[in-house]
Image: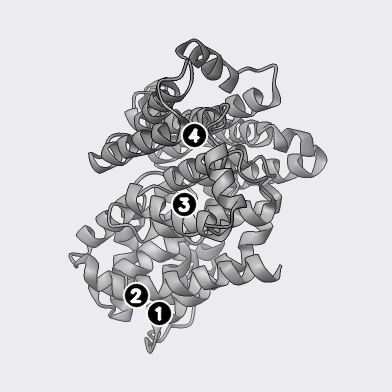
Amino acid sequence: MAILEPLPAIIISFCFLGIMLYKRVNLGITLNATALLLALLSVSWQEIPGIIYATVDYRTSEGLLTISVVLATFGVMLLSQLYKETGEINRLSENLSRIIKNPKAILSVLPAVIGFLPVAGGALMSAPLVDSEAERLKLKPEKKAYVNLWFRHTIFPVYPLSQVLIITVGVTEITMASIIVRQIPAVIAMIIVGYIIGFWRVQNPKSKEKTAKEKNSLNSNFKNFLTSFSPIIVTIIATVCMELISPGLAKQGIDVLIATIVGIIVLIVITKPSLRVLKIPLKSTGIYGVTLAAYGAFFLKGTVSAEGISQILKTVLMNGSVDILLFLTVIPALLGFLTGSANGGVAIGASILAGVLSFSPKTAALLYMSAYLGYIIAPTHLCFAFTANYFKCSLGKIYKYVIPSFLITIITVLLTYFLI
């Protein structure tokens, strides 16, 4: 027998969630603890083991999806950490900076390329290179910080290995390709607005004509760049091909899992790391925290979907007292902002909506972009904090560029939602 009715259970559990987030408790622990508390308050305790088991029951499509997404999340984090530990990410960025001589172009592309590695605070990896190139354009510190932060995050809405995208696919059960297609306009808007705001009235320095030696060096740098980038390229191609060949694998989350394994193998073949280097990522607590958060997203969704809990929100929506658009925009954006995590915004937002609506590519993309944009501008966002600290400027000075960028992008997202 349940201790409380669904509504009080939801209120208490999400107040607990807010406290955990305020205390900066690891998101994986927070999501799982909230799901467990909600289960203890809203269903008979004898049912809780069943809910936990159903989340990872490989005999069901939902359980298999959870297992695949959790393992794929672990794989993506492992690939990212191996890129860092083997030094391949440094070689990739160095060769790219030698290939592209236009400072504006390199400042637009380099943070995005580093963004292919979805590691916490990853903007710090591109900051030194951005700083060097930005000096040639004589950008102010706040402009340097904005360019580094904004362009790093332009790639993720259409990047198949994004942890947020993987979790969105899992909790909404919408194919990755259909979500990515709807997010292309937002990415284009992010790039355009970033370029305009970042380089408004900024002149490129005059470039010298390349010598024959420099042209040969360019070819060499390009080959080295492709070699360093090949694990990521192979992983993306494998994901796309499996979605096209077997949509069933995509719905079960197996496509990204297999593709990630392929990418890791390619990286190991290229870099030939020692056993010691291979062990380093496995000793990192960060990789397990993100993986636990992926499981927590499904556990919380399963708990909210338990009998009677989702009926509260469904009744509210059916009575028309709250518009569904509010649930898909303001709430995920606010959650992303408050948690400093796009994963948190998507996972919690989808859990709130569990059983209330049937997700479509349209609604899944809106949920993702709302949470993602809220996360980008959050002061608790590690990339934001690290970037501001590196370039020694206040958050307020960066916000005067970030807020207009946010508004233009979210308008593009809403226009896409209504018109396409």
Disc 4 and disc 2: Cα gap in Å? 32 Å
Does label 1 or label 3 sit earlier along the sequence? Answer: 3
For label 3, the residue is 92
Viewer-proximal residue among 235 and 268: 235
Task: Estimate the x, y position of residue 131 in percent, counting from the top left.
Answer: 29, 66
Kindly check if marks 4 and 1 are in contact, taking CB atoms under 8 A apart as contact: no
Does label 4 or label 2 sit earlier along the sequence? Answer: 4
Q: Amino acid at mark 4?
A: Ala
Does label 3 or label 2 sit earlier along the sequence? Answer: 3
Does label 4 or label 3 sit earlier along the sequence? Answer: 3
Q: Secondary structure at mark 1?
A: helix
Disc 1 and disc 3: Cα gap in Å? 27 Å
Using the rendered view, name the quadrant where residue 252 is placed. top right
Look at the image and tell me whether residue 188 can be seen: no
Q: Amino acid at mark 2?
A: Tyr
- Circle on res. 401: 2
Disc 4 and disc 1: Cα gap in Å? 36 Å
Disc 1 and disc 2: Cα gap in Å? 7 Å
Q: Amino acid at mark 3?
A: Leu
Does label 1 or label 2 sit earlier along the sequence? Answer: 1
Q: Spot the residue most to the top.
A: 46
For label 4, the residue is 297
Question: What residue is rendered at 58% in x and 27% in y?
Answer: 307
Q: Secondary structure at mark 2?
A: helix
For label 1, the residue is 197
Q: Amino acid at mark 1?
A: Ile
Q: Of circles 3 and 2, which is in front?
A: 2
Task: Estimate the x, y position of residue 122 in percent, counting from the top left.
Answer: 36, 50
